[in-house]
Image (spheres, rainbow, N blue to C red):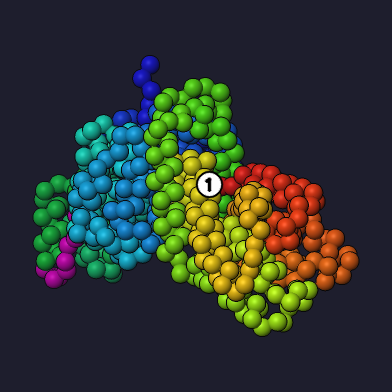
Amino acid sequence: MAVHAIDCRGLVVRYGALVAVDGLSLTAERGQVLALLGPNGAGKTSTVETLEGYRRATAGVVRVLGCDPISQHRSLVARIGVMLQHGGVYPTISTRRVLELFASYYEDAEDPDALLELVGLRGLSSTPWRRLSGGEQQRLSMALALVGRPEVVFLDEPTAGVDPEGRLAIRAVIAALRDRATCVLLTTHELPETERLADEVVIITRGRAVASGSVAELAGAGAQGGIHFSAPPGVDLNGLVAALEVDASSVVEEEAGRYVVKDQATPARLGKLAGWLAEHDLPLADLHAGRRSLEEVYLEVTRARSAREEEPQGANEDADDEADDGRADEEEEERHAPGLGEDQLDAEDGKDTSGSPVGPTARLSAHALRRLAAQCGAEVGMTLRRGESLLLTIGIPVVLLVFFSEVHLLPVGTAHPVAFLAPGILALAVMGTSMVNLSIGTGFERSYGVLKRLGSTPLGRPSLLGAKIAAIVVVEALQVVVLVPVSLGLGWHPSAAGAGAAGVVVLLATAGFGGIGLLLAGVLRAEVNLAAANGLWLLLLLVSGMLAPLSKLPGWLEGVAKALPAAALAQALHDSLGLRVAVPAWAWLVLACWALVAPTAAALTFRWE
């Protein structure tokens, strides 16, 4: 039996009392363009994101290319392409560079230059995403969806905000995808575009399909040979009825400026209509004889469904509220959906979570290492380009080190403050880089939709987090390169024998603080996360022993501080580099615990969006 490209049977998606999708069934084949239409809040987003693997179905069967989008997500993402409605691209990376980066995720990727040519962006190859117009961003987003030579492509509002030239380019791309037997599922509110592009149409409202078929089938159904046209609002219907020689009830102004003549669309009647409008100097537009436009069909079936459901509906009343606000259903999904990640823990070892082999693209290989290296390069490059990030991680520590070493304001308990401050400032730098930088950067990437787009590629969570950790280590190395010479210039004499222990301490602390940073980014919105990460950094600084000995704290507060990773890091670096004594067991234990617990908590809460 042939496998459908998309096979959705009895799909139900529920968020608490809200039923977003209610028993929806649809199929699509290779080489077919399927348009999914419906008003805001109808369940389109829930349906498409369930097919993409971002949402878990409450009930029903969902298969894409024969794969379960959740349990076999890792094997599926190499065969599909996803175009998001908004964002999803690193703001500072150039157009060509981001295509090269995404191409590195796939074993058989399209040529980035060919894709730029295809979507009409070759002249903007060095322009970063944030400097592109809305239409240009849409075209780049489509190119990213195509970079892996997908067998199924999901396009969310592909022509929204695109200029006429861009629309022509996107239509040509979709036609080319159909010709090479790629299945395309698109959502759009632009019905004339659907008439041009779609082979099949499914119209849904309140999570249920209310009409389906080809554009011609939908337009012809129930048309009864009538005449549909547009003219200025308020036309003299009585005069028009007399001219057409039809019953008064046969001519209706369905809405301002849109008219229907229900009688047969004969050539004579069409001539009389044109003559009467010309006699009254009225323009004629949007004439459909014997068939309706897709927009008319859409309005008819969605209004009919709404009229039948105006009475109280129980849980579906919430869907009406969501329809009043175009984004409410998506925000509800973000609060309740499980997201990706939970099922991907063992994705890199060549097994999906069901335990079945998923083929060579999911196995750890030379290509997986190249993919990791490419992402590492991108993460490091973006980190080094963030001026505010470098100020926090290098500039501020240098200023604090120099100032407090020369101006004896802190109760460090030594005649040479730099002997105490140098290890403490190194600890401060590690905490700022691995917690604050990682948290803020990841939080805004989630807010921009970047992580959501990455979740639809073969990159995988282990490679992404590994690349972020590598970027942290690079920045920490730069901090050492800058801070150690400055400290030596101020008279610091570290213990070279403790360098090895200090290196292990820094690695443990990086894991612990990095886990905290990712945990914050995973549970807080970007703006809240920004304040929380900086606030936590300041709080930990005050009780860490980085700028003053822990013994200066009240006894109870010192006990609390010793359970925190900041105090353990500062104590360990002071002892290994400055005091030439063994790192106390409590510091090792605290660092090891945080290095295990914080990343585990971050992994359990990590979502691509």
Q: Residue 304 location, x and y as percent?
A: 44, 49
Q: Residue at x 60, y 74 (%)?
A: 490
Q: Is residue 88 magenta?
A: no
Q: Residue furthest top?
A: 1
Q: How many marks?
A: 1
Quarter of the view holding residue 433: bottom right
Q: Is residue 569 visible?
A: no
Q: Residue at x 46, y 28 (%)?
A: 363
Is residue 283 shown in magenta? yes
- Where on the picture, by quarter, is residue 525? bottom right
Residue 194 seen: yes
Q: Is residue 475 left or right of residue 16?
A: left
Q: Nearer the viewer, residue 155 or 345?
A: 345
Answer above or below: position of 354 versus 257. above
Give whichever of 373, 489 is nearer the camera.
489
**Disc 1: CA contacts within 10 A as few (<14), some (14-19) or many (>=20):** some
Name which residue lies at 26% across and 31% down.
Answer: 181
In what element is the residue under mark 1? helix
Relative to 90, is 519 on the left or the right? right
**Residue 412, position as x, y percentages in the image:** 75, 73
**Location of residue 265 in the rendering, given as x and y in whole percent from the top left corner:** 18, 47
The amino acid at mark 1 is: Leu
Is residue 386 positioned above or below 497 on the image? Answer: below
Position of residue 67 measured from the top left corner of the image (x, y, whole percent): 45, 28
Which region shows up in magenta? 279-287
On-image quarter of the N terminus:
top left
Q: Residue at x 31, y 49 (%)?
A: 99
**480 or 456: which is nearer to us?**
480
Q: Which residue is mark 1?
A: 465
